[in-house]
Image (cartoon, rainbow, N blue to C red):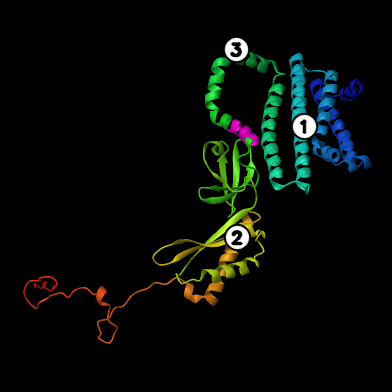
Amino acid sequence: MSSLRHQFDWLPDPLGSVLLLIAAALFALLFSRIITDALPRLPGLRKIQFIHALTIRLKMNVRYFLMIIAASAALPATEGFSPETEKLLAHVLACLFIMNLGFGIIRAFRLATDQYLNRISSKENVDDITVRSHQTQIRVLRRLIEITFGVLTVAASLMVFNSVQKFGVSLFASAGAASLIVGLSARPALSNLIAGIQIAITQPIRMEDMLILNGDWAWVEEINATYVVLRTWDRRRYIVPISYFLENPFQNWTHSSQSLIGSIFLWLDYRTPMDRLRAMFMEEIEHCSDWDKDRSSIACQIADSNAQVISIRMIAGAADAGNMWNLSCDIRERMLHRIQAEMPECLPRGRTAVVSDSPSDTPWPESLMSPPVNRPGNGQYRGPDLKAPTVS
């Protein structure tokens, strides 16, 4: 480094020292580019997928690492800097080194968890509930670990400066008041972080669970450290604080299994022959591609009735929520088409009884007839004409 420094003797000492540091960093950058571009092409690394992906993911961190090391090695050969400036540059390089190392570890940790999730998702003998449980735990805990490690990395890198160390000592001296103020101001964030840990452990919701929120069907798209992203069927997004799922009741339709039972209701006339309708339903369900072929989950029953119609409930199972919705729509369309074509008399209708006073019509039975009413043309109404009882 001293011989390299003499190449800049024709410049003022501070400027020559700055160029020396820049030259050392550029030389390290060139050398690191050769290394990082050559490592992924090695035949041995190509066979080890994780190491090959790790070298690609940490390419920039390795380059920054070598540049900081080269600049730190060239710093003692500089001239023209005051002791305070040289000490400040050393602290800056140490700060950058710690931050680069810490965030490099975070990137490596993220790569390892991604590789694990991809491997468990590709296994054929693992059920969907297990896969989504692992995804939920790893995604939530990974974000919490990354946030915690990131804060510690920044704190450790800033502690190399004396001014920050003095501030830290004074902060610890007043830790009681500071912790109270920070605790009150950061209570929502802390409650969501703690709720995230509880969600990861207890798992009331998982990735791609189907929930009912505000009357909408929504799938769990992301579970972050402090909030959850829900995707509705029409591609809207709900952004919900993660503590909501520990403090409020909600419906989780896929908590124990992906399979669901869909139901449809038809309102038909009282003259509907149920045996024929059930046979028609069994014929049409066989042609529905979204049905899960589970005969124990199908039924066609009279669920309710009122003065005009009866309510027919038809149920059938499907593999997941999307298939359940398509199955319900398919069955409803097929049954309405068959009823319109083969049993139009079963469609709902209103009934009105028309009573005529014509003598040609069949008279009402005497038991149903009201007594005659005496309505004189003039004078006061005296009520129905009732025959006086005979006295023997």
* Picture disc at residue 301: none
For the view shown, which residue lies furthest in the left direction?
379
Q: What range of the chain is rendered magenta? A: 192-201
User: Any magenta on residue 162?
Assistant: no
Q: Nearer the viewer, mark 2 or mark 3?
A: 2
Q: Where is residue 328? Give x, y as percent.
A: 58, 61
Measure the alpha-carbon separation of dots 2 and 3.
Answer: 70 Å
Q: Earlier in the sequence, mark 2 or mark 3?
A: 3
Amino acid type at image mark 1: Gly
The residue carrying mark 3 is 173
Circle 1 sits in a helix, a strand or a loop, which is it?
A: helix
221 on left or right of 313:
right
Quadrant where the image shows the C terminus: bottom left
Which of the two residues, 366 or 167, is positioned nearer the viewer here?
A: 366
Circle 2 sits in a helix, a strand or a loop, which is it?
A: loop
Amino acid type at image mark 2: Ile
Q: Nearer the viewer, mark 1 or mark 2?
A: 2
